[in-house]
Image (cartoon, helix red, strand yellow):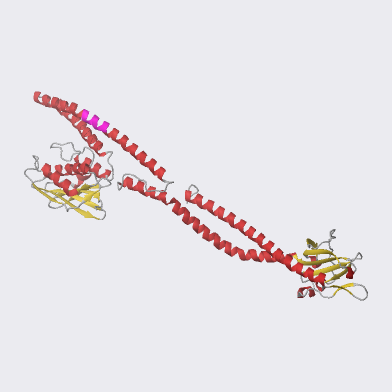
Amino acid sequence: MTARSLRWRLLIAAAAYISTALVISALVLSLLFERHVKAWIDGELNAQLDQLIAGVEKITSGELTLSRTPKDPRFEKALSGLYWQVEFGAEHRVLRSRSLWDFKLTLPREQQIDQESRHHRVAGPGGQELYLLQKRVELPARLGREQAYFAVAINEAEVQAAVWRFANALIPLLVTLGIMLAAAAWIQVSIGLRPLASIREKISSIKSGAQARLGSEFPDEVRPLASEIDSLLDKRDDEIEVARTRAADLAHGLKTPLQIIFGGIARLKAKGDAELAEDLETAARMMQRHVDRQLARARLQGRRMDAVADVKSVATQVANVLRRSPDGEHLEWLVDVPSGTVAKIHTDDLAEALGCLVENAARYARSQVTITAMKEAGGITIRVSDDGPGIPKDKMPDALKRGERVDTSGPGSGLGLAIATDIAEAWHGTLGFTPRADAFAVELRLKSAKTS
């Protein structure tokens, strides 16, 4: 695929969209997980704050102390990452968990006294950054109505570590999801571009003659394109028909003056001016060959390439016509074509090509002309053979050239084999010679057509 490939562009766009969506999804999921973790931590820290507040007692000396502390064992382990601290009265007498060891937290000074806990980030022991939950409370009358600060904190790194563990666990899932989405994008693009491939295949079928138009069996988005192509083909056929008609008119228009010229040549010969008559006849014959060839090409152009012809029917008709000709009336004719032999060619074109070949065979045959056909892999071979002298091997290439005549002693323009070659090539076929010991044969190879 190249940078100009539509498939490549769609896949690049899909890959960019999928990658962006997955990255955003990873960030959003990590953020949601972090919020969930912090909400869970807030609940745990609030519960521990409540335990601290509920554990405040006044001893006999009048000092405030804690009769019970939170039971989490991390509070007993030095620098464990989970800490609590309480400050009483204006002198800020401090009680703290064993996990703080000899470190004292610097608690923010709240201005409000309420039941709501507040979040802060403070420095902790060992360079830790702590996520701290704090309440400023006025103790009840039995405890002297002193103001106290209660704080519970956790190492922020533990929260981030949990988020990173979640993100790392998320990566394989997102990679797998990305691969699945990329595969889905590939399938989607392939299915979406399939109608364009279908158009290409149908255009190839039109070129080969398998069908005439694209048709309308396409998705709604592609149908207008197919319709425009069909309209273009219709316009092309109309223009070819006009050009074909003009070429035929021109060729027909020249035939009458040529007949007049040939008449004048005959009169010159009768008067004894043979040299001038021969020069004029040579030029006139050349003109006639061009006219005949243009007439044949005009009939050939503009054919719809989805036509088919029944080979047996056409071969029989051609043989019946030529067996009544002066060259064919003394010959034995044999047509051996299996029924149901159908070729991809217009009936008129097959008749003209066979007419050229059979006419040549009748002209040179001694006693017999044979027309046979056989089905081969993907094609049909039509053989026209006669028991005449044939064409020397060294002359065979020249026999197929335009206007070339191997035998110049007899009548004819030398265009029969060339016209048959043009017709064969127009229908994606070939024309060739098959010399044999007892006969000479010309083979016309065409594509076979399916029959219902």
Residue drawn at (47%, 56%), measured in percent from left and top? Answer: 187
335 lies left or right of 159: left
To which quarter of the image does residue 71 belong?
bottom right
Asked whether, in this view, residue 205 is left or right of residue 8, the answer is left
Task: State the residue in front, 278 or 261.
Answer: 261
Let me know if residue 302 appears in the view: yes
Magenta range is 245-253
Q: Is residue 363 above or below residue 184?
A: above
Residue found 42% across the figure and 52% down from its top: 194
Q: Is residue 44 magenta?
A: no
Examine the image and state in which quarter residue 158 appears: bottom right
Instruction: Return the residue nearer the eye: 38 or 212.
Output: 38
Residue furthest to the front in view is 141
Position of residue 247 measured from the top left corner of the image (x, y, whole percent): 26, 32
Furthest residue to the left?
330
Residue 70 appears left or right of 227: right
